[in-house]
Image: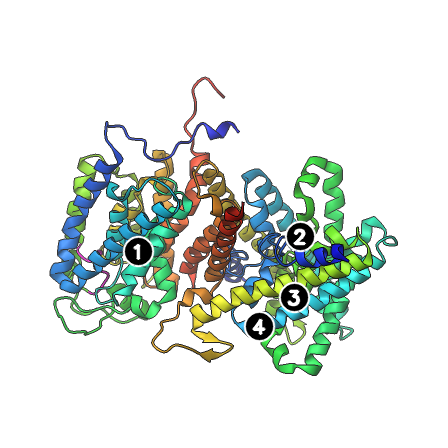
Amino acid sequence: MNAAQFLTIFISAVFIYNVILSRFLGLCSFIAISKETKPALAMSLAVMFVTTMSSIITWFIYRFLLIPFNLTYLRTISFILVIATFVQFVEMFIRKISPPMYRFFGIYLPLITVNCAVLGVAVLNVDMFFVNSKAVAGSFYYSTFQGICVGLGYTLAMLLMSGIRERLDLANVPKSVKDFPLAFIIASIMSLSFMGFNGFRF
Amino acid sequence: MKKLFYEFLKGIIKENPTFVLVLGLCPTLAVSISLINGIGMGIAATFVLLGSNIIISLIRNIVPERIRIPCFIVIIATFVTITEMAMKAYSPALNRALGIYVPLIVVNCIVLGRAEAYAQKHSVLNSLFDGLGMGVGFTLALLLISGIREILGAGKILGFSIIKGFEPVFVLGMPSGALLVIGLLLGFFNVLKNRKI
Amino acid sequence: MSNRLIVSVFPHLHKDESVSKVMWTVIISLIPAGLAAIFIFGTSALWVIILGVVSALTTEGVLQVLTKRKVTILDGSAIITGILLAYNLPPKVPFWIPIIGAFFSIAIGKQVFGGLGQNIFNPALVGRVFLMASWPKYMTTFTKPASFDAVTSATPLALIKEGSVLENISYLDLFLGKRAGCIGEVCILALLLGALFLLLRGYISWHIPMTYIFTVAAFTYIFGPKGLFSGDWLFHILSGGLILGAFFMATDYVTSPLTYKGQVIFGIGCGIVTAIIRLWGGYPEGVSYAILMMNAATPIIDRYTKPRVYGRE
C-alpha cells in the first residue's frame, strides 16, 4: 500500500477518467439535476455516499462470499442488489429528514440505483484490485478510496455544470436549445477539455 | 384497441425515452458507436423492457412498497440474464460485439424508469404495449445516433467503408462527440416541435 | 432569486465606448503576430487566417439570420474568433480545417449560447479542441519555418515530450519565432507588442496573464527533469501557446471572472493545469485545455468571489 497509488487513484477518478465526462456513467441524473447548484450539490453528496458505502459493502461480499464459494459470476446480480437495497434505505432516510427534498428528487433518487457510476465503481474496484480472484494488498483501502474519488469526480462535474447552467439562466439562449440540448453541448465541450489529461503518467 | 395503440405509439415519438424523457443515456452513448451495436442493443433492451413491464405489472398489487425497487431489479436482472444466455446461444457474434453492455441493460434507466413510473400503476395489457413502444422508440433513437456516429465518425456503415477520400470526424467516436450528437439532435427535434405549433 | 440581480455580463465598460471599439482595438493588437506569421511561414499562413475569418463571419451571419436575431457581424467579435482560431493552427493545414474549425467555434462555441457576451467557453479554443480531437493528424503536422517545402518538424514542446534533446534552438530563436508551431503562437516578440498595446490602453489587466505565466514558470522550475528546482522555466514560457493564450485568450472578458481576485484564481488555475499537462500529460501542450477548463469554472469562481455589498452582512 503506498501513497503514489492513492494519488494515482485520486487524479484518475477525478480528472483523467472523470466518471461523467470521460466514462459517461451517471449521465441521466447529471443532466437532470445539474440545473441549480444547491440540488446539484445535494445529489452529489448522496451519490458520493452511495458510491463509498457500496464500494465497501461490495468489497466484503466479493472477498468473503463470492470468491470462497466460487460464485464470482454472480458479481453483477449481487452487486446491483446490494446497491438497490442500500439506495432504498437512503431514500427512506431522506423522505423522513426532508420531504421537500424527497419530492424534488422525484424519480431520480431511486435512479441512483441504476446510476451507472455506482455499479461501475464497484465493478472497477473488483477489476483493478483483485487479481486472479485474490485481493491485492491493501485492496480494501484502495477500493474504498476509489469509491470516494469517483464521488468527488461526480461532484466536480456537477458543480461546474450547475454553475454554468445557472449563469445561462440569465442568457438569451435560442429557444430550441434551451435546457437539455444545451446541457449536452456543454457536457460535450467539458468532455473535450478534460481530454487534455489523456495519457497522464506520473 | 385504439388506446392500446396509443400506448405503443407514444413511446416512439411523444415520449421517446431517449429524446423526450432523456433516460437511458449511459448505455446509449457507449453503445452507439456503430450501427450493429445499436440495433443489437435496441432489440435486447426491448425484450427486457417487455418482459419486465409485464411481470411487474402482474405483481404490482402484491409487492410491498418499501422493497419494490430491489424486487424490480431482480425481475429485470432475470430477464437480462435470459437475454444474455439466448444471445450467447443463438448469436455469439452479436454477443461479442456488445460485450459488457448486455448485462448493463440492468442499469438502463429506461427499464427501471418505466417499471417505476408506469408498470406498477397500470394493467398488464397497457404495460405490454408501453414496454413495446418504449423499446421500439429506444431502438430507433439508437439507430439514428449510431448511424450518425458511424457514418460521419468512422466513415463506415455496418463495418463497411464508404466514400473514399472522406476524412472521418474522429471526435464523434468519443464521449464528447456522442454528447454533441445527442445535444444537436435534441435541439433539432425541438426546432421541429416548435414549428408544428 | 436575488442573485439574478447581482452578477452582470460583459460588457461592463468603464470608459464610454462601444463593443465594436474594444473588438477592433483587439484586432489591431493581433496584427503584429499575423504579420510575423506570414513572414515566418509564408502565404499558407495568410490563407489560413483569411479562411478562418471569412468562415467565422459567414457562420455568424447565417446563424443570426436563421434565428431571427440582429446581425452583428461587423462588431468585430467574429473576426477575432476567426483570427485566434487561425493562430492556433499549423501552417500547412488543408483548407477545410480553418473553415470547419471557425464554423464550429462560432456555431457551437458562441451562437448556441445566445451570442456575444453569453458564451461560457472561449469560442476559438472550442473550435481548436474540436479540430484536435477530430483530425489529430492534420493538427499535429508542423513545418519548419523559413522553408517553403513540406519538411515536417516537431515543435520544441513535442520534442521534449518524446525525450529528445533539443538542438540548435536558443532562447532568441524561441522569442523571434524561428521554430515549428502554430502560426500565431511562435513569434513572442510580435505577441508581446500587441499585448503591451492592450495593457497600456487598459483593455486587459495584468492579473490573468501574469499569474498564469508565473504559475507555469514556477511549476516547470520546481518539477524539473533532473530533480527539484532544475526546470528550464524560461524555455517553457517562450514555448508553445502560452504567451498567445495568456494574453489574448485567457483574458477574454466574457469567459473569465469579473473580479480581480477571481482573475487571479483563474490565472493560477490555468497555470497549474497547463503545467501538469506539459509535465506529465500525454499531450505536449496544455494551454487550450487549461483555459477551457477554467472557463467552465468561471461561473463558480464568480459566485464565490462576489464583492461584498456594503450595508449587508
Identify which residue, C303 or A105, lies in the foreground: A105
Q: Is residue A105 left or right of residue C248?
A: right
Residue at which label 3 appears: B104
Residue at which label 2 appears: A112
Task: Report if residue C182 lies within the magenta region.
Answer: yes
Circle 3 — which element? helix
Circle 4 — which element? helix
Range covered by the magenta-colored residues:
C180-187
Would you say the residues marked 3 and 4 are in contact, meaning their CB atoms lie under 8 Å apart?
no
Query: Badge 4 local density, few (<14 within 10 Å), some, or many (20+)?
Result: many
Query: Badge 3 local density, few (<14 within 10 Å), some, or many (20+)?
Result: some
| Eye-nearest disc, 1 or 3 | 1
How was this image coloured? rainbow
| Eye-nearest disc, 3 or 4 | 4
Q: Amino acid at mark 2?
A: Ile
Whether residue A185 is situated above or below residue A164 in the rendered picture? below
- Residue C278 spot, x, y in % from top left: 34, 60
Residue at which label 4 appears: B37
Residue at which label 1 appears: C102
| Residue A104 seen by the camera | yes
